[in-house]
Image (cartoon, rainbow, N blue to C red):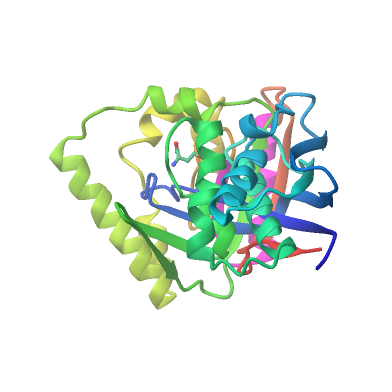
């Protein structure tokens, strides 16, 4: 049996405009890295965290990577000593599924390290355990795409029902991350508790349209469906120059553009690397006028999920 393992897990874009809490996709970069080591004495300890500016707890049960390891060991009924090293390679509170990436990387790594042979379906609840610590709510729209790769639909939560949606080959994602932090917990508090039937009809039309568009590789349908009449009108207020960035992305050839997860990052989908670069430059140009620094990531859709590195 191996003594240690290093795993990469990708960032993800949840909600995808119309699918609040029920859809997400993984991107090739950025992502988090986790190292697990077996140690002599029992218990789970976090020995090192980098890239978090000291913000993440070192106490394993309060950490998004530690909690899934503890829960999974309990489930397996064993108590070996495990050391965890976490290397955050993406900004925290960015809307890129940072906590989900750490939770998935940890659960996946432990399964491989112990050769426990759990399936992705079986690992999912342990990864959700970690995500719950960060956002205070059970939603799997970052964790599931991060674990499976590709586009994922969560058809239902009781019980959880994961559906993999085929991804057209030439689909590119541009992410812009404005350097501000938004806590998912806070961004959920401002959401409406009820939705008018008219808006619900628009939203589920778009959700179904997006799934159909992806399955048919119909980029025009994907483009028409990347709309959100429920969450975006409220959360966009948290992001400086949001609609200006979105307009810049759309006039640069984006199929659609919206908030990634709970923000502040925006995502834009397009059909070529060149267009996705142009979108990135256009959005960054808008933000430069406000003086707010940002990072741009250009990526294909990640179809693999976590991997041993
Ligand atoms: N669906 C969640 C939300 C994702 O938007 O609150 C948060 O990462």
Q: Please give the name of the residue rendered at 69% of the width and 37% of the height, measured from the top-left corner.
A: 285
Q: Quadrant of the N terminus?
A: bottom right
Tell me where residue 169 sits by quadrant: bottom right
Going by the image, does 100 lie left or right of 125? right
Q: Can residue 199 be spotted in the picture? A: yes
Taking the image as shown, residue 267 lies to the left or right of residue 224, namely right
Residue in the image at 41% along x and 28% along y: 188
Quadrant for the C terminus, please: bottom right
Residue 12 colored in magenta in the image: no
Percent position of residue 199, x then y: 21, 41
Q: Position of residue 67 (x, y in %)?
A: 61, 39
Q: Quadrant of residue 28?
A: bottom right
Residue 211, how many percent across, how many down? 36, 65
Say left or right for 138 vs 120.
left
Answer above or below: position of 27 versus 214.
Answer: above
Extreme-left residue of the structure = 197
Asked whether residue 277 is in view, the answer is no
In-front residue for pair 195/41: 41
Region in magenta: 266-287
Query: How many numbered marks have been drawn onto this rendered protein structure?
Result: 0
Please determine whether, in this image, residue 219 is positioned above or below residue 269.
below
Estimate the x, y position of residue 81 in percent, counting from the top left. Answer: 77, 46
Nearest the eye: 104 or 269: 104
Q: Provide the major secondary structure of the magenta segment.
A: helix
Q: Does 273 lie within the magenta span?
A: yes
Question: Please, is residue 289 above or below residue 113 in the view?
Answer: above
């Amino acid at each position: 049996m191996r003594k240690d393992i290093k795993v990469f897990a990708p960032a993800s874009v949840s909600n995808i405009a119309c699918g609040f809490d029920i859809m997400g996709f993984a991107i090739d970069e950025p992502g988090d890295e986790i190292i697990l080591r077996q140690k002599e004495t029992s218990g789970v300890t976090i020995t090192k965290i980098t890239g978090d500016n000291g913000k993440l707890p070192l106490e394993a049960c309060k950490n998004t990577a530690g909690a899934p390891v503890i829960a999974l060991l309990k489930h397996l009924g064993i108590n070996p000593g495990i050391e965890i090293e976490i290397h955050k390679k993406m900004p925290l509170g960015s809307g890129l599924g940072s906590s989900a990436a750490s939770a998935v990387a940890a659960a996946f790594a432990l399964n491989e390290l112990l050769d426990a042979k759990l399936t992705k379906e079986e690992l999912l609840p342990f990864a959700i355990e970690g995500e719950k610590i960060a956002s205070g709510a059970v939603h799997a729209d970052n964790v599931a795409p991060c674990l499976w790769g590709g586009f994922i639909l969560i058809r239902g939560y009781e019980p959880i029902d994961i559906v993999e949606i085929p991804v057209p080959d030439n689909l590119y994602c541009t992410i812009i991350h404005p350097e501000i932090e938004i806590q998912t917990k806070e961004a959920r508090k401002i959401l409406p508790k009820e939705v008018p039937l008219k808006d619900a009809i628009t939203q589920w039309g778009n959700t179904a349209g997006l799934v159909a568009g992806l399955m048919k590789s119909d980029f025009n349908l994907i483009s028409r469906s990347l709309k959100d009449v429920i969450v975006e009108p409220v959360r966009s207020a948290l992001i400086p120059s949001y609609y200006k960035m979105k307009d810049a992305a759309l006039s640069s050839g984006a199929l659609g553009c919206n908030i990634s997860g709970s923000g502040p990052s925006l995502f834009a989908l397009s059909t070529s690397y060149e267009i996705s670069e142009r979108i990135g430059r256009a959005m960054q140009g808008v933000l430069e006028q406000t003086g707010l620094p940002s990072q741009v990531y250009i990526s294909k859709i990640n179809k693999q999920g976590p991997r041993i590195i």
